[in-house]
Image (cartoon, coloured by chain):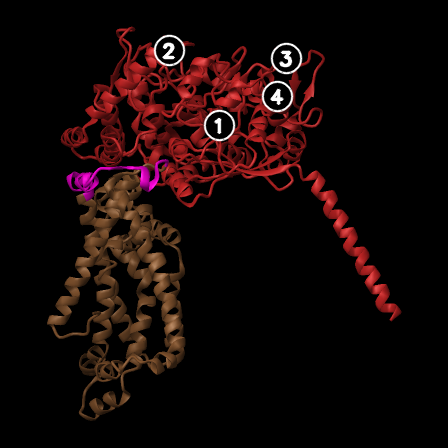
Chain colours: A brown, B red
Amino acid sequence: MSTIEKDAPALKSKLNKAEVKRQRVLLIVAGLYVVYGIIFYYLPLFGWIMAFQNYKLKDGIFGSQFVGFKWFKFLFDDKTFLRDLRNTLGMGVINLVATTVTAIGFAILLSEVRNVMGKKIVQTISYLPHFLSWIVVTSIVRDAFATKGMINELLQGLHIIKEPISYFMHTKYFWPIVAISNVWKETGWNAIIYLATITSIDPSLYEAAAMDGAGRWQKIKHITLPGIRSTIIILLIMNIGNVLNAGFEVQYLLGLGVLKPVSETIDIYVLNYGMANFSLGTAAGIFKTFIAMILIFLFNFIAKRAGEERLF
Amino acid sequence: MKSKKIIALALACTLSVGAFAGCAKKKSESISDWTMIAFMAGKELNEGNEIQEELAKKTGVRLKESWNTSQDVASAVGTMIASNDLPDLIDGGNGSKMLAEAGMLVAWDDYLAKDEYKNLKEMFSDKQWELFRQADGHIYWANVFGKTYGEPKSRGHNDEAFWVQVRVLEWAGYPIIETLDEYFDLLDSYAKANPVNADGVEVIPYTALCEGWRYFCVENAPEFLDGYPNDGSVIVNLDDPDNPKIEDYNVTPTAKMYFKKLNEVYNAGIMDPEFATMDYDTYIAKLASGAVLGMCDQNWDFAQINNTFIDKGYKELGYNYVPLGLVAEKGQTKNQWHAYADVPNVSSGIAVTTKCNDADKAFKFLNQMLDQEIHDLRFWGVKDVDYLVDENGLYYRTEEMRANWQNDAFRAKHVCNYSYLPQWGGTHRDGKNAMKPEDQESEFFATLSEPLKKAFDAYGYTSYGDFLRSEHITQLGFWYPMYSHSNDMDSTTDYGAAWLKMGDCKHEWLPVVITSKDFESDWAAYQAAYAECKPELFLAEMQKELDRRAALGK
């Protein structure tokens, strides 16, 4: 936001002894994080060597035989891996879009509620599912979508379908089910940050708009949405990097047998094929990181070109 | 001042008493509290379980068993290795080889050579022990199941079969069921006549579990239907006895016939519509509700429902299952559903980990488990409390004792089998009794429910094995079972990768062909997808291993 840009030159003040002394507490705290980052994020990268070896637990990193790009070749020759890559990207993007849109929509709706009590209650209830573990959520989903489950009964009751559908027998329903589960679980939680941003919008803007005769819809369109735009972009960029973490639990728990072609993600692939074969698992992990970085840079670049807020 | 002194004195007394108590406690603490994990369903014992305490006194080890039912054993073991978080003893299942390769298991070799551990040595012949030897030249585990001491006494059938609730047979007048057609006709006609159970539960004529590694329930029947024993991943064709040949049961005409039949019954509404999407817990819940008339499964995979049947009184309603040994063609005599020979599964078993601080004691403990006295305590219980001895020296139980041993709550506080530690079936060292009560003739018949007893009488059978009408083959090929080799495979080899792919392909396609509206074209598509997994690489490796084992056995 503009305030950051105005402050920016001030940060560039000379780095002299007095300045260091003045900021020593900050520097120490920051230093701790740098050390933490090095230990937990950068040192483990050493293990990437395994991807280029026939890694054996017994021989360790130093004793295992080097095989070059064998495992990467294995991955790209493997239809299963390419299929799982597609699934991961597909579900990742659908989840990202679905959860973002619903969270923004929900936050706006909630911010329009005038009854404080009602607003608080709805907000609390709506973010509770976030704290449920996937194993619980998947049992609920499994029950709800069962042949004799809630959804089928509802649709039959409304005469939309005649025969119950077995949702878990057809590949076409799987991605939507995963998206719905994600939306159900995360909407309330994700909305919190948007709600907070909406609250910080200067109320005088709304008052001025009201003076000019703007209605609710116009206020949302011209004040609320532009007001949270930069938050949306930043969160999108950050979440883009997570697209490849489209999920493990929900797909693993719901995606049995027939659904494998659409449910298996890279993480599940790594579990199935990489558990006794650490080299292959590492290679898949490296590849995933690589894609995630490309996505972040790409989206950041787009945001930059569009003159929007960006990460770096 | 005085009061302060008194308080100080009192405190000092308390402290020293505490210290002495500490000492006293320490003395009896020569009992090691160890942990053990098995990748199977099991019941945890109560703290202070009576027989467990007795065993602890006798052996100096109190073993806390945990049961891990994760559907993917190799990954659970992988996680344990990665976090270096191991129990003292482990049955690593499919992950056993990984544990050994990671150097996490203690080798048995030195112990087997010593006389002190002769009970362990006695478990297998020298040749059989050779099969347990890993690539690095050591033996790391011993499988504890399927071993007979002396004369065979087994009356159970712990393995795979097409099962049917005994009430169905009774209803049909105890027919002999030989083929899939007869089997499904029986289930269907019973379900049509009795669509709802006494408690209002709708019956499910047939179901098949497809989840994770347990998908053998749907997958490997063709091997048995053709009359082969459970080599698991392949068939060993013995048409030329000197040149055993590996064959793939996934592509045989019988496989097609079997899946076509499943497709037919699925479309006729005889098969559970949820079969492909249920997980193991759902499956067990369905069986335990008494709703399922028939399924194909290994007995150990669902035996846990028996206690529910007792609790709910389903036992008397004839919900218990009996096995049927179906064959591909009527009149086929080739049938090895029931194995009359001992079959060591060399791919897994009980192992001591490097985490255990006293390996000598651990092996001594395992050895003691096979002492007759300890073995009796584990499986028969305490004399005069859990069993009585008649004038001929035969063990027996009273009704009350039997009821106790079938009661979960009682078992948790009193009974301690250590069911994944070394054990024997067959005849007691006294030459009269059975090693385990369920094999003792008097106990076996006394614990059968009324409907089961009637079925045994009607057919004139004296063991569950009889129901399967299998050939009495007491000596299987030395290579048997071949699945102990495929269980060890992983993606580091091309044949291992092919094996994993074949499994994935079957997981994906079998439900598709079973639920298909156009079986022929889906079957062709499945076979094409299967061929793409390069099963020939896998089969060639299995042939190599078969030849190796066959040579070892000569």
| Secondary structure under the numbered disc 2 in the rendered image | helix
Q: In this rendering, would B513 be left or right of B390?
A: left
Q: Give how far apart the Cα atoms at labels 3 and 1 are.
A: 36 Å
Query: Is A72 one of the magenta-colored residues?
Result: yes
Callout 2 touching callout 1 (CB < 8 Å): no
Closer to us: A96 or B126:
B126
The mark closer to the camera, 2 or 3, is 2
Q: Residue furthest left?
A: A305
Dot 4 or dot 3: first in sequence order is 4
| Secondary structure under the numbered disc 1 in the rendered image | loop
Query: Could you confirm whether marks 3 and 1 are on the same chain?
Result: yes
Per the rendered image, the range of residues in magenta is: A58-81
Q: The disc numbered 2 marks a residue on which chain? A: B
What mark, if any, has residue B371 been given in the picture? 4
Disc 3 crowd, CA 10 A, few/some/many (<14, 14-19, 20+): few
Identified at 59% across, 30% down, the residue is B361
| Secondary structure under the numbered disc 3 in the rendered image | loop
Q: Would you place residue A2 above or below residue A160 in this image?
A: below
What mark, if any, has residue B553 been given in the picture? 2
Dot 2 or dot 3: first in sequence order is 3
Q: Position of residue A309 (x, y in %)?
A: 19, 74
Q: Which residue is mark 3?
A: B430
Q: Amino acid at mark 3?
A: Asp
Closer to us: A304 or A22:
A22
Q: In this rendering, would A145 be left or right of B16?
A: left
The mark closer to the camera, 4 or 1, is 4
The mark closer to the camera, 4 or 2, is 2
Q: Position of residue B58 (x, y in %)?
A: 67, 29
Query: Could you confirm whether marks 2 and 1 are on the same chain?
Result: yes
Q: Which residue is mark 1?
A: B318
Q: In this rendering, would A80 be left or right of A306?
A: right
